[in-house]
Amino acid sequence: MAQEKSKTRNRIGIQPTCWTNDDFPEIGNETPYQTILDETQSCGYEGGSTGHNYPSHLPSLIAALKRRSLSITSTWVGTHFTVEGQYDATLNMICSQIAFLKSVGAHDIVVAELASAVNQVRTKAVLTDRPIFNEAEFYLLKTGMNEAGRIAATEGMRLSYHPHVGTGVQSREEIDRLMGGTDPTTVWMCLDTGHAFFAGVDPLKLTQDYGHRIGHVHLKNVRPDVMARAVAGKFSFFQAICEGIFTVPGDPEVDPEESINFPPIFDVLKSFDYAGWLVVEAEQNPAKANPKDYATMARCFIRSEFELRDYIL
């Protein structure tokens, strides 16, 4: 019965960041969006978020998706609630993104506070040069997220906060502080297994503790040898990606004992009756990792370990 429930209630997507990168557009920028959509479909996925090179003309985007029977999973919104004078502008931006998502039939909005974030700064160490929010900034962030979550819920949308390396919500303590100060009925969590692991947060424990609030899931694995170099060498996010820190779940070259073991995470999600998108998101350089090969690899893994595997709950 649990197997049937997962098939009907969960959808499997993949992000265009397997082909290109919104933070660093030169990575895979030569790949046309049509190729991304074609390979998304041919590898057995149901959709993904938009990428920087997708059509900005809404009818063109909808037509391209419809031709391939694909959906938009969500959109990424970088908020600036903690920046002086940006509170109202941030809420307005969220409202505009909600309107866009509704127009393409999506129901999830994924957000992260990017004030003073260093994930897009090529000269900053992503783990250590990031902002540390003070009491006032956390108050603004929690207040803003509660209001944004309320607006999203009113519009029939689900807002999920994405803890992200290089930002002010990276550590387990910061995650707990934000989630503990926001409304559990309107502010959800986007579980990103790779960002959690890179930040030193146990993704399995995070799933166990917040399974009741997980509203969106990004699945990526971490290459432990690259992570060790990234931590020791204080890599920027750009450098870490170029060195290949992330890969897809199911990569046979990554030992689950040394990185992320996904089946127990899948077990916990099912035990909480998770209903939503499971989205593969390997921010890789396509020159080093053929996107279609890795997309196929991940889809086969999810099919065997999430959709077809028998679970004892």
Image (tube, rainbow, N blue to C red):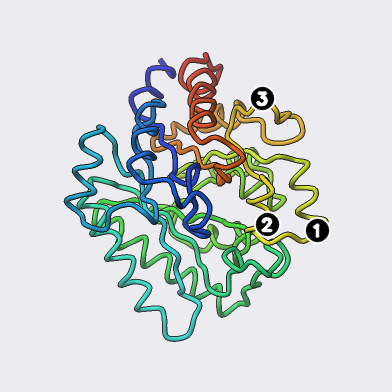
Residue at image coords 48%, 43%: 19
Check disc 1 and report the residue beneath it: 233
Q: Measured along the vertical axis of the image, is residue 199 above or below residue 88?
A: above
Q: Quadrant of the C terminus?
A: top right
Check disc 2 and report the residue beneath it: 239
Q: Where's residue 20, x and y in %?
A: 48, 48
Q: Measured along the vertical axis of the image, is residue 190 above or below residue 233?
A: above
Q: Where's residue 106, x and y in %?
A: 28, 46
Circle 3 SS class: loop
Residue at the outermost right position: 232
- Camera-side residue of 291 and 114: 291
Give the residue type that dot 1 points to. Gly
How far is disc 3 from disc 1 in space, using C-alphas? Answer: 26 Å
Residue at image coords 47%, 61%: 182
Residue at image coords 76%, 34%: 258
Residue at the outermost bottom position: 85
Q: Earlier in the sequence, mark 3 or mark 2?
A: 2
Q: Are marks 3 and 1 in contact (CB under 8 Å)?
A: no
